[in-house]
Amino acid sequence: MNVETSKNLGGVGAVLLVVGALAGFANGFAGALDLVGLILVMIAMKGFADHYRESGIFNNALYGVITAIFGVVTVAGVAVVAILNVMAAGFDIRNPNSWTQQFTDFNSFWTKFSSVIIGVIVALIVLFVFFVISFIFFRKSLDTLATKSGVGMFRTAGLLMLIGAVLTIILVGLILIWIGFILLAVAFFSIRTESTQPTQTKSTAPL
């Protein structure tokens, strides 16, 4: 895969991540855009890793994705266990009266669900840690790509997304990550492809 193809795939993938993040607030199917965008970006990173003969470009990005997936799966597992424990305790989440009865007696509520609440809090902390680690790997990948391609905006995008990951506990963190995706798209499209050398014709010596 040549540089032109990699830059286009990466640019389009980053744009899909930007659009998917915006559409996520209004459309539940926006996750499909994010998934396709992420896949295209990863394909592009693999192409650049092969072109520049630098495996770290792809490997660090892959480690970042795996770390993020592991964090999400961990939280999802905790959520399932929490729901099962709540149902086993006789709490019907579909019945509004059940909510009223449980919250009326706080001591009874805390006795039944304290382990669930603590588990959810721990799971969210774990997700936050894995989220930050994920963007640390991704920043390393973009730093290497910035050095190899000469496009410094990759480095800026990676740093901005890492800062955003650290600040995800407040809304501004998500905004910074979204801006980082925009810079990533611009960086991909800013990569210069190798110019083709003009064909040289043999000149015939004068008779």
Image (cartoon, helix red, strand yellow):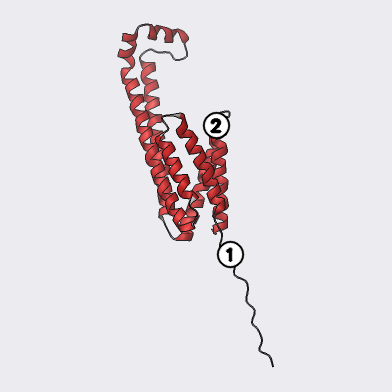
Q: Position of residue 110 (x, y in %)?
A: 32, 13
As helix, strand or loop, the secondary structure at mark 1 comes to loop
Calculate the distance from the C-alpha at mark 1 to the C-alpha at mark 2. Answer: 40 Å
Residue placed at 46% from the left, 53% from the top? 146
Instruction: State the residue position of label 2.
Output: 24
Type of residue at label 2?
Gly
Find residue 112 and report its image quarter. Answer: top left
Type of residue at label 1?
Ser
**130 relative to 95 in the view: left or right:** left
Find residue 66 and report its image quarter. Answer: top left
Numbered badge on residue 49: none
Residue placed at 44% from the left, 15% from the top? 93
Crowd class of label 2 (few under 14; some 14 to 19; many from 20; radius 10 Å) = some
Viewer-nearest of discs 1 and 2? 1
As helix, strand or loop, the secondary structure at mark 2 comes to loop
Numbered badge on residue 195: 1
Crowd class of label 1 (few under 14; some 14 to 19; many from 20; radius 10 Å) = few
Q: Residue furthest right?
A: 207
Q: Position of residue 76 (x, y in %)?
A: 41, 30
Q: Residue furthest bottom?
A: 207
In the displayed structure, would residue 86 be above or below residue 25? above
Q: How many marks?
A: 2
Q: Position of residue 134 (x, y in %)?
A: 40, 41
Residue placed at 40% from the left, 26% from the top? 79
Q: Earlier in the sequence, mark 1 or mark 2?
A: 2
In the displayed structure, would residue 40 be above or below residue 110? below
Q: Nearer the viewer, residue 129 or 119?
A: 129
Quarter of the image where the C terminus is located: bottom right
In the displayed structure, would residue 206 be above or below residue 85? below
Residue 68, can we see it?
yes
Q: Nearer the viewer, residue 194 or 113?
A: 194
